[in-house]
Image (cartoon, grey):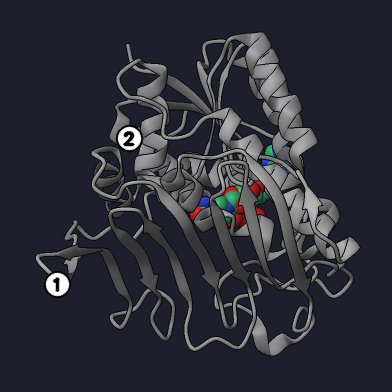
Amino acid sequence: MSTKLGIIGAGGMLQYHAAGVKESGGEIIAIADMNLAAAQSAAETYGIGQVFASADEMLAAVPEIDAVSIIVPNKFHAPLAIQCLNAGKHVFCEKPPALNAAQTQEMVDAATQAGKHLMFNFNNRARPEAYAMMEYIKNGDVGEIQTAQAKWARRTGIPGFGGWFTTKAMSGGGAVIDLPHMMDLALHFMGYPEPAYVLANTFDTFISDKRFKGPWGIPDRADGVTDVECAAHGVVTFKSGQVLTVQISWAEMVKREEVSVVFQGTKAGGKMERLFGIDGLDETAIDSCELYVQENGNSVNRDIITEACEDMGRIRSMANFVAVIEGKEEPLNTMDQALKLMKIVDGIYESARTQAPVAL
Ligand SMILES: NC(=O)c1ccc[n+]([C@@H]2O[C@H](COP(=O)([O-])OP(=O)(O)OC[C@H]3O[C@@H](n4cnc5c(N)ncnc54)[C@H](O)[C@@H]3O)[C@@H](O)[C@H]2O)c1
């Protein structure tokens, strides 16, 4: 029997969740959105039978739901996930896991109590390049990754002014919490070590400057709040001695949008990178996945060729969740890892606030 899913949130990301469920052989049987018209329109597009204006109504009316996908602004991740877990559902939640580590811990506790899966959409781990790179790492070809650099740097990518993305009470923060993907991917490659210290600073230089608005995102709200960072730079050390350098921005003076993890291992270095085009994902965008080794007295650079994946693993990531529930695949991410990531995110904000290193 196929896994039956309910969806909460009929916004921009739903298309990938819907495609992922389809790929997995699961079935979306209900959808809820506080904007009922958005839920109805999505139901028509994806052939979803039951439509609701709230998660409460959906959970009460459709007990046969096995799992819920949560695709709403960050503030609602924790309360909705905990509600669904308490109702006995598996949960797939969009990134970031929650507004902070304390909330993430509450979600983890609820999942443990319920004995249900709780996974997050760290979709970059599901890109073909990431799967391929992990094979080299697992096989021992890279050795121990001692240092890594995680970067998601945008030049003009503020996702609207005054909407939920730029209101800290709704989002938990700006670029750092919105674009944690490369930090997560670097940690995935590094073996998700235990963090020790963070030293970082955040910048809000362009956060109210309309010239730095992204080509996508949500409409501006004149009466809305814009109180988050548009860039952060920092360094994270680990109890293992490993070191991760981080650069994350919606808006800073870089040449073009760069999304990358670079690492230095004891046997090989490597890079997984997407350079976005001039206008987002256009024909000038360049994906690369490389290994750097010393062989026969030569410096050798190897290209790892994988299929193109425009959606950055979003469809596969959702499909993995359903396969995990059905016992067909190992989970691409764990609750423990989400907690570590959110401790680092909290540490970046705390270090910026105190202008001092933070022990984690
Ligand atoms: N993994 C990725 O690559 C990626 C990319 C973009 C966004 N996201 C994440 O996806 C989530 C949603 O982003 P989006 O771009 O789809 O947002 P969106 O603003 O397009 O849509 C959110 C939807 O949720 C609904 N909603 C809000 N609160 C609700 C509630 N309490 N109950 C029911 N419905 C509610 C809204 O009416 C809206 O239709 C965010 O957490 C964001 O960080 C992830």
- Residue 110: x and y in percent read 70, 18
- Name the residue carrying label 1: 298
Q: Which disc, if any, is residue 22?
A: 2
Relative height, residue 91 to residue 130 (above, below): above
Of residues 42 and 353, the one nearer the viewer is: 353
Q: Which of marks 2 and 1 precedes in the sequence? A: 2
Residue neighbourhood size for the residue with mark 2, other residues' Cα within 10 Å, grouped as few (<14), some (14–19), many (≥20)? some
Q: Give the image quarter of residue 265.
A: bottom left
- Residue 348: x and y in percent read 74, 57
Instruction: Determine whether the residue tagged by mark 2 lies in a helix, strand or loop.
Output: helix
Could you tell me if residue 57 is visible in this image? Answer: no
- Residue 339: x and y in percent read 66, 35
Relative height, residue 262 to residue 48 (above, below): below
User: How far apart, in angstroms, are the residues tagged by discs 1 and 2?
Assistant: 47 Å
Q: Cβ–Cβ below 8 Å for labels 1 and 2?
A: no
- Residue 22: x and y in percent read 33, 35
Q: Residue furthest front?
A: 297
Amino acid type, mark 2 = Lys
- Which residue is found at the position 43% from the left and 66% from the top? 260
Residue 229 as seen in the image, left or right of residue 51: right
Amino acid type, mark 1 = Asn
- Which residue is found at the position 64% from the left and 14% from the top? 112
Residue neighbourhood size for the residue with mark 1, other residues' Cα within 10 Å, grouped as few (<14), some (14–19), many (≥20)? few
Relative height, residue 337 to residue 300 (above, below): above
Instruction: Give the number of callouts.
Output: 2
Instruction: Determine whether the residue tagged by mark 1 lies in a helix, strand or loop.
Output: strand
Q: Which disc, if any, is residue 354?
A: none
Of residues 49 and 294, the one nearer the viewer is: 294
Of discs 1 and 2, which sits in the foreground?
Answer: 1
